Amino acid sequence: MRNLLSIHDFSLLVEKTRQGRLRDILMRMANRRGAARRSWENVVSPIKHWWDIPEVMERWNTMISGAPRVDYLAHFLGARFAGGESRRALSLGCGTGHRELDLARSGAFERIDGVDRSRTRIAYSRQMAHDAGFDATIHYIAGDAMTVELAEDAYDLILCEQFLHHMPRLEAMLSRVRAFMKPDGFFIFNEFVGPSRFQWTARQLDAVNLMLGELPERYRVRWKSGTIKRKIHRPGELAMMLYDPTEAVKSAMIIPLIRDMFDIVEIKGYGGSVLQLLFSDIAANFRSRDPETQGYIRRCFEFEDGLLRRGEIAHDFAAGLCRRR
């Protein structure tokens, strides 16, 4: 049976109330259509996610490119986009615009279009592009990527970063991506590809809770509320749909659909099956460079690495480079 409702959803509600988020939750429940839109309005996030730990970011890079300072975008662009040819790039769900700046700084693109449905983020991105001197190169469009009018067969590169797992009409969105690409174009994605609606596997939950129990209590103090993180549970799907109806809506289908619809050049998994859950809400406690903290970070990394190596868990995050089929 589907995990429609979980008793643990109520404990999660209590925790979010302690974090001062009850009003936000009630508004989301009252207006599901606006819930996702409000999620995408933020331009600054609290330090509570696994990516807020510098060593995690270096780990991502190493797992994808083999070098801690070379991220997935630089790795996939590589020599493929060297030279001074006039090229066009499109970034879908561009958010706060930092990837468009990376593309502009590469010098490989004459024009870069960024699309996001949040007008707040588009305004922020435009200001960032202006401040960096890329007004003539980067062009932002406030609109829905599913309906925005863009030229077909027009882009040498299309980028989707943490965007596709919010798409209810995933196959249709990927069809649009393919249509926008030039016949010899590339498609780069970086996505959560784990269980849809965060329906974590039993092995994941066992592993995360085992590792969580080995951390001293001072490392398990949650952001803002100050409560102690003691156990991870699988959320009920109803709670997921009420809180954000687009969160991980069809995430488990991303890789299979991409394999069906594009020619794969390279796909790299970078874990997250344990570490994302483990560090959520407590990441701020792991930002110190002291030997003890660094030791615990290494233990967590080694623990997930072992599970991945033995095939006990799969990568919940992946980045890839594809060609138009």
Image (tube, rainbow, N blue to C red):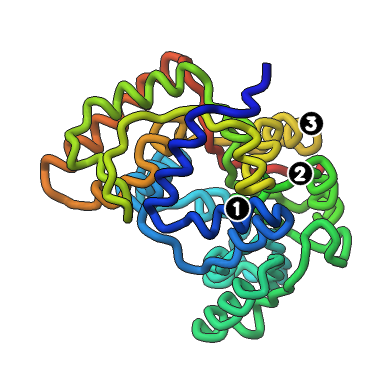
Residue 267 visible, this angle: yes
Q: Position of residue 17 (x, y in %)?
A: 43, 51
The residue tagged with tag 2: helix, strand or loop?
Answer: loop
Which residue occupies 51% across, 28% down? Answer: 7
**Residue at the spot 44% in from the left edge and 62% down from the top edge:** 45
Q: How many marks?
A: 3
Tag nearer the camera, 3 or 1: 1
Q: Is residue 88 above or below residue 225?
A: below
Q: Is residue 207 above or below residue 267?
A: above
Quarter placement of the N terminus: top right
- The mark found on residue 168 in the picture is 2
Residue 194, x across and y down, in percent:
58, 32
CA neighbours of label 3 inside 10 A, class few (<14), some (14 to 19), many (20+): few
Label 1: which secondary element: strand
Task: Of the two numbered discs 1 and 2 on the same chain, state the one appearing first in sequence.
Answer: 1
Q: Residues within 10 Å of mark 1 (few under 14, many from 20)?
A: some
Which mark, residue 260?
3
Residue at position x 72%, y 29% in the image: 256
Specify whether 218 is left or right of 163: left
Precedes in sequence: disc 3 or disc 1: 1
Lateral position of residue 189 relative to residue 308, left or right: right
Report how far apart the C-alphas of labels 3 and 1 lie in the structure: 20 Å
- Where residue 244 appears, x then y in whole percent? 63, 48
**Amino acid type at mark 2:** Pro
Which one is nearer the viewer's eye here, 215 or 185?
A: 215
Which residue is label 1 attached to?
161
Q: Nearer the viewer, residue 304 or 323?
A: 304
Q: Nearer the viewer, residue 311 or 325?
A: 311
How far is the residue under mark 2 from the one under mark 3? 18 Å
Q: Determine the residue positioned at 65% across, 45% down.
A: 242
Q: Is residue 106 visible?
A: no
Q: Position of residue 255 (x, y in %)?
A: 67, 33
